[in-house]
Image: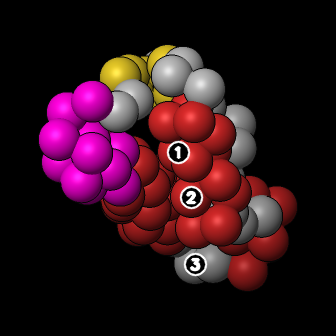
Amino acid sequence: MSQSTMDYAIWLAKGSNAHLVGIFLDEFIYRSYSVYNVFTTADDPAKVMKKLDEKDKAKRDEAVLQFKNACRKVVLIFLFAGIKVLPYRS
């Protein structure tokens, strides 16, 4: 997740009194690694993919947490007069 993009989105939502919705899609087909490379190089592709999928999930979880925390921080700074936080995860 780009910090500058998130900061800009929060600033824009705050300035226009708008809702900011973070959408984090959990698609099984999107991976940070090449499935082909795993199957052609690993002795136990299923085991390797499981480990890599867990790392990907941890990264996605961290992105959601980072978004929620950034929005909460902004809301606290502006004494709850700021943005409405609506994180969405599919």
Q: Mark 1 points at which residue?
A: 10
Q: Element type at marker 3?
A: loop
Can residue 56 be seen in the rendering of this structure? Answer: yes
Sequence-first disc among 3 and 1? 1
Q: What residue type is labelled 1?
A: Ile
Q: Mark 3 points at which residue?
A: 43
The count of marks equals 3
Is the Cβ of the residue at disc 2 closer than 8 Å to that at disc 1?
yes
Task: Name the colouring of the figure.
Answer: secondary structure
Percent x, y for residue 57? Answer: 41, 52
- For the record, the magenta segment spans 70-81
The correct choice, above or below, for 14 with respect to 5 in the image is above
Kindly report the secondary structure that dominates the magenta region of the rendered protein: helix
Q: In the rendered view, does 19 fall on the left or right side of 82?
A: right
Is the Cβ of the residue at disc 2 closer than 8 Å to that at disc 3?
no
Q: Element type at marker 1?
A: helix
